[in-house]
């Protein structure tokens, strides 16, 4: 089975719950994983940036990955986030992390350095060579400070065997359409923008790696399934049902929004590691009101 077939639908970039003392809350992580699987997500993404990976140390990451594999227990695929702006370190992590049970690796484009397109290409070429699993590019210029152009994505897709897909969060519909038009048949292309998932699937994307699915897994997964079946008339009401919730999720920062939702759903404590902090009381109150209407 190709990775494109295996990861069709809704992937959820799972949060990392913390206790009040800032240690990882594995019981809460288990509850969030169960909540998502029971409500129909297609796969789990562990240690993405929504999982606050920049503030989690290596030993904790090993424990989180192993716990996630154990909890998921082969019910859905697991993708592991391993990225960074130090190519050598990313390559070393790919060799040392426990990836035997992973379906793929999601690797964010280097942030802050602002490499040229050739630098991005060479970074991913080396990452792909080092990775024991297929690599999914992650283009999120709003966070990294640089864009992976459509030409660079397609060059990586066609020239590097172990580059298997892209999570596209540029928000640039035209760029996405160029990738979708010219991609190899087995190259996975998923949305990284929850708000744009419906129109991007209409353009040909294979699904989404979602923040919103953490807290709206049933509605969001069903919306994506209907879109992939071409039933946009049925998907559209679910898209608009989730719209206000999506706005609240990203009103201040991610994952503060989704953690506030999950706290109100009784799944986790509302704790983030600095430099992130919980939502302001005004936005949190809007989330409480939204959930109880």
Image (tube, rainbow, N blue to C red):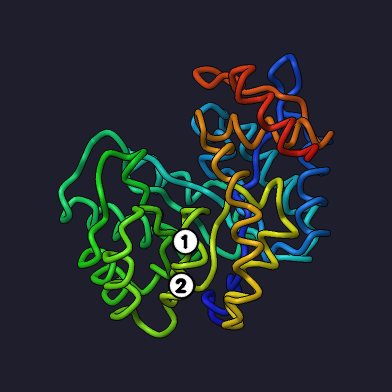
Give the residue number, with chain letter if any, for mark 2. 205
Q: What number is the disc on residue 191?
A: 1
Label 1 crowd (10 A; few <14 / some 14-19 / many >=20):
many
Residue 155 lies in what quarter of the image? bottom left
The quarter of the picture where the C terminus appears is top right
User: In this rendering, would 154 be left or right of 270?
Assistant: left
Label 2 crowd (10 A; few <14 / some 14-19 / many >=20):
many
Q: Is residue 195 depicted above or below 103 in this figure?
A: above
Q: How many marks?
A: 2
Q: Is residue 221 depicted above or below 265 in this figure?
A: below
- In the structure shown, which secondary structural element does the residue marked by tag 1 occupy? strand
Instruction: Please state the horizontal and vertical placement of residue 32, each as a whole percent of the image.
Output: 77, 44
User: Do the CB atoms of the residues marked 1 and 2 lie less than 8 Å apart?
Assistant: yes
User: In this rendering, would 127 be left or right of 215?
Assistant: left
Looking at the picture, tell me which residue is in the foreground, 126 or 37. 37
Precedes in sequence: disc 1 or disc 2: 1
Residue 279 lies in what quarter of the image? top right
User: In this rendering, would 251 be left or right of 14?
Assistant: left
Identify which residue is drawn at 76% across, 64% down.
Answer: 40
Q: Is residue 160 visible?
A: yes
Identify which residue is drawn at 68% across, 30% down.
Answer: 260
Work out which residue is located at the far front of the displayed protein and give it. 293
Identify which residue is drawn at 29% across, 60% down.
Answer: 125
């Amino acid at each position: 089975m190709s990775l494109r077939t295996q990861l069709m639908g809704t992937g959820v970039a799972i949060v990392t719950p913390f206790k009040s003392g800032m240690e990882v809350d594995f019981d809460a992580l288990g509850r969030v994983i169960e909540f998502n699987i029971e409500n129909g997500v297609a796969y789990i993404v562990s240690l993405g940036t929504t999982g606050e990976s920049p503030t989690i140390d290596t030993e904790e990451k090993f424990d989180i990955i192993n716990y996630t594999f154990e909890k998921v227990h082969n019910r859905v695929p697991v993708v592991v986030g391993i990225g960074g702006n130090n190519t050598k370190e990313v390559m070393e992590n790919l060799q040392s992390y426990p990836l035997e049970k992973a379906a793929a690796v999601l690797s964010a484009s280097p942030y802050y350095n602002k490499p040229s397109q050739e630098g991005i290409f060479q970074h991913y070429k080396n990452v792909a060579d080092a990775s024991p699993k297929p690599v999914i590019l992650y283009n999120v210029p709003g966070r990294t400070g640089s864009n992976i152009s459509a030409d660079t994505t397609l060059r990586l897709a066609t020239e590097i065997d172990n580059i298997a897909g892209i999570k596209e969060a540029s928000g640039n519909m035209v760029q996405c359409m160029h990738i979708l038009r010219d991609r190899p048949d087995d190259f996975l292309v998923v949305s990284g923008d929850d708000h744009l998932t419906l129109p991007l699937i209409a353009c040909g994307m294979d699904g989404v790696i979602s923040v919103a699915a953490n807290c709206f897994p049933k509605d969001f997964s069903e919306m994506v399934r209907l879109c992939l079946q071409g039933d946009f008339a049925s998907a559209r009401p679910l898209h608009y049902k989730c719209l206000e919730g999506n706005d609240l999720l990203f009103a201040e920062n991610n994952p503060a929004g989704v953690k506030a939702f999950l706290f109100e759903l009784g799944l986790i404590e509302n704790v983030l590691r600095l430099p992130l902090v919980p939502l302001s009381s005004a936005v949190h109150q809007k989330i409480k009101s939204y959930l109880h209407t």
